[in-house]
Image (tube, helix red, strand yellow):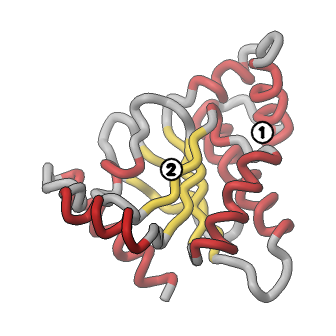
Amino acid sequence: MQQEIIERLNRGNRSYLEGGAPGDVSAARRRETAEQGQRPHTVVLCCSDSRVIPERIFSAGIGELFVIRVAGNVLGPQQLGSIAYAVDHLGCGLVLVLGHTGCGAVAAALEGGGHGAVATLTDEVLRAIGTERDPARAERRNVRYAVEQLRRHYADAAAPDIRGAMYDIRSGAVSWLDEGL
């Protein structure tokens, strides 16, 4: 089942790369989800970066993705609660942590962190990346850290499938991170 969802996301990304049509955002689909509720197949924890638009990246329509956006795709209590809601109440079987190239939150952490409220994000990114100082490797490590946190949280048999991927802001392609997180 989860492999089917991953292939659906891959097909959507290929469609996006080829300039294909977006997912179903029709009035009929709005009406259907308003009357019958949402049944997204995937939770996407991603960065708030304006260049990262999961619904477009995966050619998804209304009701397909449950998207949680936060700078640096960090996992805090509110994000974890949102993921739990989507998994427990909406039946999402896949949780995807989607990082991206050129992440400003990772860059800010590498440059010494943030100040004030921004530090709540950059401090978490610094925890995730440890001693890594290469931006590309730090971005992947940041995704892997959130995946590991989620897997620890869902250590029981009823855990959703939890994966990590990177979105390339230049090419538009999504690459799945290796399972050896």
Q: Which residue is mark 1?
A: 129
Seen from the viewer's position, the closer of residues 73 and 83 is 83
Seen at 76% across and 34% down, the residue is 125
Residue reaching furthest to the top: 115
Tell me residue 60's x, y (percent).
32, 59
SS at badge 1: helix
**Going by the image, does 54 lie left or right of 159?**
left
Tell me residue 123's x, y (percent).
84, 28
Seen from the viewer's position, the closer of residues 17 and 132 is 17
Instruction: Measure the alpha-carbon separation of dots 2 and 1.
Output: 15 Å
Seen at 23% across and 53% down, the residue is 16
**Going by the image, does 97 lie left or right of 81?**
left
Tell me residue 142's x, y (percent).
70, 44
Q: Amino acid at mark 2?
A: Met
Q: Amino acid at mark 1?
A: Ile
Seen at 73% across and 79% down, the residue is 159
**Looking at the rendering, which quadrant does residue 34 occupy?**
bottom left
Q: Which residue is mark 2?
A: 166
